[in-house]
Amino acid sequence: MEYSKEFKEAISNFTSGEKDKLIIRLLKKDRILSHRLYFELIDPETADDKRNQMEISIKEEISIVAKRFGRTKYFLPGIRKISAKITEHVKITTDKFGEVSLTLLLISETLKNVPKTGDHYKLYIYLLNKIFRSLVLTKKLDPDYYLDLRENFEEVEKQIIQNKSLEQLTLHNGLFLSWLEPENIPEEIDQILKGIKGEGLLR
């Protein structure tokens, strides 16, 4: 929704008290916006602090989900919920580096805890989509971040190589393992991804 000049002027004419009441009402209806304003205005913790906390949380929560759900059918929804927390972290902190590093951590930790029973296809396709998304986002980062992400990518590659069925599925869906080095990600990775999905893959 675009706001007209007249609408903006009407808002600016509110008294200070009226604006305060309006802001509080809006914040009560938008939890993410409320957390983001708190983070930007008065939170003593930095984005780095919160990212470090998320790293610990991701490892702990995936371990709990793995122990609780021994079948992929129930395991995947738990992973999706953890992924949603990463999305929330990014919306609150605008931590673009963390969006990639935390997602790669989610992927590697998930692969370390894959259930021994059940059909893994949907789980693997979900993770492959996450990997491709991480590649696209990495290319949008300053190259200075590549070194910091190298270990995350290496761990994901290691887990894929140790899982032959996943490795075959990875190649079948157009993802080359050589791309799991930030410097080797193709410049046109976003277009490559569109083409792959256009062929009906990653589903």
Image: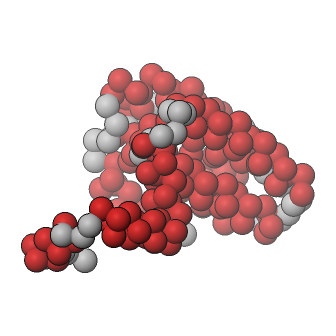
Q: Residue at x 41, y 68 (%)?
A: 21
Residue 5 appears anywhere in the view = yes
Of residues 65 and 91, the one nearer the viewer is: 91
Instruction: Decide: is 198 above or below 88.
Output: below
Residue 170 appears anywhere in the view = no
101 left or right, relative to 166: left
Q: Residue furthest left?
A: 5
Of residues 44 and 1, the one nearer the viewer is: 44
Of residues 141 and 43, the one nearer the viewer is: 43
**Image quadrant in which the C terminus is located:** bottom right
> Percent position (x, y) of residue 18?
33, 70
> Percent position (x, y) of residue 166?
66, 51
Give residue 126's quadrant in the image.
bottom right
Q: Residue at x 54, y 49 (%)?
A: 89
Q: Residue at x 34, y 37 (%)?
A: 141
> Percent position (x, y) of residue 160?
65, 42
Instruction: Decide: is 163 above or below 173.
Output: above
201 left or right, relative to 77: left
117 left or right, relative to 29: right
Q: Residue at x 52, y 68 (%)?
A: 28
Instruction: Decide: is 4 above or below 89.
Output: below
